[in-house]
């Protein structure tokens, strides 16, 4: 997803403020969409979580081990920060304003989105998504939120394009079956 050059990572690791500002600009929309899609947060909660996440990133840059992927490191910080956030904050306000931006055009079933928006509350949709295995969840997220191609998803998840298509098809069938 992110293709950070080594020189950029080095500037980040040296606590270069300009590099961190660039990092923020390159990543904030992706992380925001991830939070809204994965956790169904209110806009305020998502912004609070992201603000704290970027502060934590700045603080933890010196702990990065260059033997591993920088992107994986950053995603680990975000996911662990989310766990901490939910431990501290017991009552999260769910919202449906993020659903308006989701485009499921490849389904060939635009009525599915209409149905989701009109007939189901977010808790039911969230429960349905959480019932998916992690790979299937990631395939749906990468396809419909990040709008990646089957090839890009396969590269990210170490799957063949056929495996991506199969995972996506099975996950969509499960969602439809669960909600209808």
Image (cartoon, helix red, strand yellow):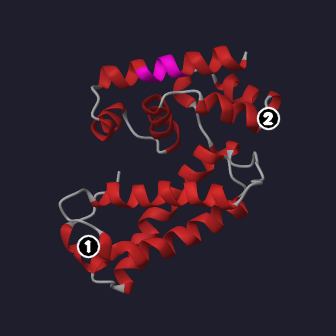
Local packing at callout 2 (Cα closer than 10 Å; few below 14, some 14-19, many 20+) is few
Q: Is residue 68 above or below residue 133?
A: below
Label 1 and label 2: CA atoms lie apart by 42 Å
What residue appears at the point 39 percent right and 78 percent down from the top-left corner?
20
Local packing at callout 1 (Cα closer than 10 Å; few below 14, some 14-19, many 20+) is some
Residue 59 seen in render: yes
Q: How many marks?
A: 2
What residue appears at the point 79 percent right and 35 percent down from the top-left corner?
121
Q: Is residue 14 above or below residue 180?
A: below
Whole-percent x and y of residue 56?
47, 72
Residue at the disc numbered 1: 8
Residue 180 position by quadrant: top right
Whole-percent x and y of residue 115?
75, 26
Dominant secondary structure, magenta: helix
Residue 74 position by quadrant: bottom left
Residue at the disc numbered 2: 121
- The magenta segment is 167-171
Question: In this orientation, which residue lies closer to the viewer: 76 or 148?
Answer: 76
User: Helix, strand, or loop for circle 1?
Assistant: helix
Question: In this orientation, which residue lies closer to the viewer: 56 or 171?
Answer: 56
User: Helix, strand, or loop for circle 2?
Assistant: loop
Whole-percent x and y of residue 100?
70, 43
Residue 32 position by quadrant: bottom right
What residue appears at the point 58 percent right and 52 percent down from the top-left corner?
35
Which of the marked residues, 1 or 2, is nearer the chain's N terminus? 1
């Amino acid at each position: 997803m992110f293709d950070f050059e080594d020189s950029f990572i080095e500037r980040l690791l040296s606590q270069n403020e300009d590099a961190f500002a660039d990092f923020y600009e390159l990543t904030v929309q992706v992380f925001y969409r991830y939070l809204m899609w994965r956790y169904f947060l209110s806009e305020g909660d998502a912004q609070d979580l992201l603000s704290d996440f970027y502060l934590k990133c700045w603080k933890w840059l010196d702990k990065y081990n260059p033997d591993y992927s920088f992107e994986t490191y950053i995603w680990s910080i975000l996911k662990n920060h989310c766990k901490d956030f939910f431990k501290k904050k017991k009552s999260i306000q769910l919202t449906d304003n993020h659903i308006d931006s989701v485009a499921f055009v490849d389904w060939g079933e635009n009525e599915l989105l209409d149905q989701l928006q009109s007939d189901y509350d977010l808790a039911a949709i969230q429960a349905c998504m959480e019932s998916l295995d992690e790979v299937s969840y990631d395939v749906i997220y990468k396809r419909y939120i990040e709008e990646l191609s089957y090839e890009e998803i396969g590269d990210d998840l170490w799957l063949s394009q056929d495996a991506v298509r199969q995972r996506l098809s099975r996950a969509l069938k499960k969602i439809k079956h669960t909600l209808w």
